């Protein structure tokens, strides 16, 4: 069967043919490829086409697809049972691994997704402070809970939505949206400031000097809690995540993706005194039948046990070279590009005229809406390179990508840019 036929089958039984809007080709046009397998840096679709994959499940696959040690851990765990509705050793050991790496992270509670993690962290912050208002930043995506969808990045931005139908005015009445990289002035009504320490859902926007430090100081001034959404950056940007990498400690963290090794999971955590407010020891209720699922914790443990600070340093160095070479290749073909880098994370902006690295959602949106990414995406796909089907996503280089793989991407980019510049 073809990608077209699978998509037609999906359209009949799944809204829009996809289970997450970011998988849709709505913003780039065409028919999504349907993946049947992945191995390391590559995925293969139903037609047998093999792509160098720079999506990597939007950052979840740090070691690449189907890493043997992760597969073995999941297989072994599945043989013991897939869910119990009771405590398991795996969730304890994974929590120990996380808290031992991240300075200031004393306890974590597992959930089943990043959306659950951010939603629960906000509820906890409100319960602890006794306040209602939450500050978030324009273009930062924190999952699809009602109060946090407003002015979100990622798929919300790609579809051109300000938020979502079905979200009441009351649900967002206590959500305040501010521009990224600008420290807002808070007051004593604010329960928490929620931020991506490295914005990675409006393409890649690095925090400017003093931004995160300013948020920390302003939260301390008024008694609000600072929440870092590290669903993407946690254990992906550094051995201990973005808070350690950037030198700013929040009150609460939200995690996902890497800690599940490719399986569904999320977590939120922070200081012991704050987490004490969660039920059953405190008044803030949060629960989940599949929270701390033994398959997901086994996979996550296999990943964290495999990676070392030296591997992160090597990956960051390779990504820096790749980003430089990619920009040079595209500009050598007559277009203009910016490839900002934070550790092993890199973004890609395209334009026909010179421009600077975007610093917020407004400047990122200018590049996203010029139409070049759509053309470039399909040109790369035809050359065997799979990018995310949306200009607001970033590129994820896994530890499985070799220098040869990245060189092939650079070569494909030069050819694709030439084709766009001189059709």
Image: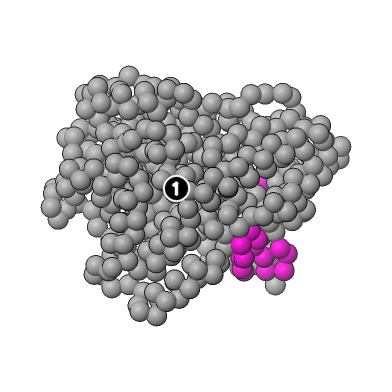
Q: Residue at x 67, y 55 (%)?
A: 402
Name which residue lies at 58% across and 31% down.
365
Q: Position of residue 68 (x, y in %)?
A: 54, 70
Residue at the farthest front position: 310
Residue 27 drawn at (x, y percent): 63, 44
Question: Looking at the rendering, which quadrant does residue 347 occupy?
Answer: top right
Tell which residue pokes out farthest to the right in this image. Answer: 422
Displayed quadrant of residue 197: top left
Outermost residue on the top side: it is 185
Q: Is 377 left, or right, of 253 in this rendering? A: right
Residue located beneath label 1 in the image: 239
| Residue drawn 45% across the image and 76% down it | 75
Query: In the figure, residue 415 lies in which quadrant?
Result: top right
Q: Which residues are magenta?
A: 26-50
- Does 38 lie within the magenta span? yes
- SS under mark 1: loop
Residue 150 in sight here: no
79 shown above or below 35? below
Q: Position of residue 414 (x, y in %)?
A: 79, 42
Q: Is the magenta region chiefly helix, strand or loop?
A: loop
In this figure, what is the number of numbered marks? 1
Confirm whether the magenta stretch covers residue 192: no
Residue toward you, 254 or 270: 270
Q: Is residue 197 visible?
A: yes
Q: Position of residue 386 (x, y in %)?
A: 67, 53
Whether residue 345 sits left or right of residue 103 in the image: it is right
| Front-lying residue, 2 or 67 | 67
Question: Where does the N terminus fall, quadrant-wise?
Answer: bottom right
Vertical placement of 47 versus 277: above or below? below
Q: Quadrant of the C terminus?
A: top right
């Amino acid at each position: 069967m073809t990608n077209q036929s699978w998509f037609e089958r999906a359209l009949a039984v799944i809204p829009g043919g996809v289970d997450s809007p970011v998988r849709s080709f709505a913003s780039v046009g065409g028919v999504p490829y349907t993946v049947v397998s992945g191995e390391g840096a590559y995925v293969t679709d139903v037609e047998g086409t093999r792509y160098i994959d720079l999506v990597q499940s939007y950052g979840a696959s740090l070691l690449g697809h189907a890493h043997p040690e992760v597969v073995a851990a999941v297989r072994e765990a599945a043989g013991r049972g897939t869910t119990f509705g009771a405590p398991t050793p795996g969730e304890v050991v994974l929590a120990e691994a996380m808290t031992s790496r991240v300075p200031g992270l004393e306890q974590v509670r597992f959930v089943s997704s990043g959306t659950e993690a951010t939603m629960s962290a906000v509820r906890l912050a409100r319960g602890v402070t006794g306040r209602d208002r939450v500050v978030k930043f324009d273009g930062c995506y924190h999952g699809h809970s009602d109060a946090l969808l407003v002015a979100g990045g990622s798929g919300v931005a790609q579809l051109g939505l300000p938020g979502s139908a079905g979200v009441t005015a009351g649900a967002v009445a206590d959500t305040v949206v501010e521009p990224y990289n600008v420290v807002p002035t808070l007051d004593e009504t604010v329960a928490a400031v929620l931020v991506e320490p490295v914005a990675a859902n409006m393409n890649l926007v690095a925090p400017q000097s003093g931004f995160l430090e300013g948020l920390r100081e302003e939260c301390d001034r008024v008694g609000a809690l600072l929440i870092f959404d590290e669903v993407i950056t946690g254990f992906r940007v550094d051995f201990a995540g973005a808070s350690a990498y950037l030198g700013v400690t929040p009150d609460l963290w939200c995690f996902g993706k890497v800690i599940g090794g490719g399986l569904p999971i999320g977590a939120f955590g922070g200081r012991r005194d704050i987490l004490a407010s969660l039920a059953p020891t405190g008044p803030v209720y949060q629960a989940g039948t599949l929270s701390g699922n033994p398959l997901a914790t086994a996979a996550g443990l296999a990943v964290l046990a495999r990676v070392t600070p030296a591997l992160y340093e090597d990956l960051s160095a390779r990504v820096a070279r790749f980003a430089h070479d990619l920009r040079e290749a595209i500009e050598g073909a007559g277009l203009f590009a910016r490839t900002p880098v934070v550790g092993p994370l890199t973004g890609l902006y395209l334009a026909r005229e010179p421009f600077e690295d975007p610093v917020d959602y407004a400047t990122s949106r200018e590049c996203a809406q010029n139409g070049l990414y759509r053309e470039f995406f399909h040109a790369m796909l035809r050359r065997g390179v799979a990018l995310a089907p949306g200009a607001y996503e970033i590129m994820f280089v896994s530890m499985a990508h070799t220098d040869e793989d990245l060189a092939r991407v650079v070569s494909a980019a030069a050819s694709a840019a030439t084709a766009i510049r001189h059709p």
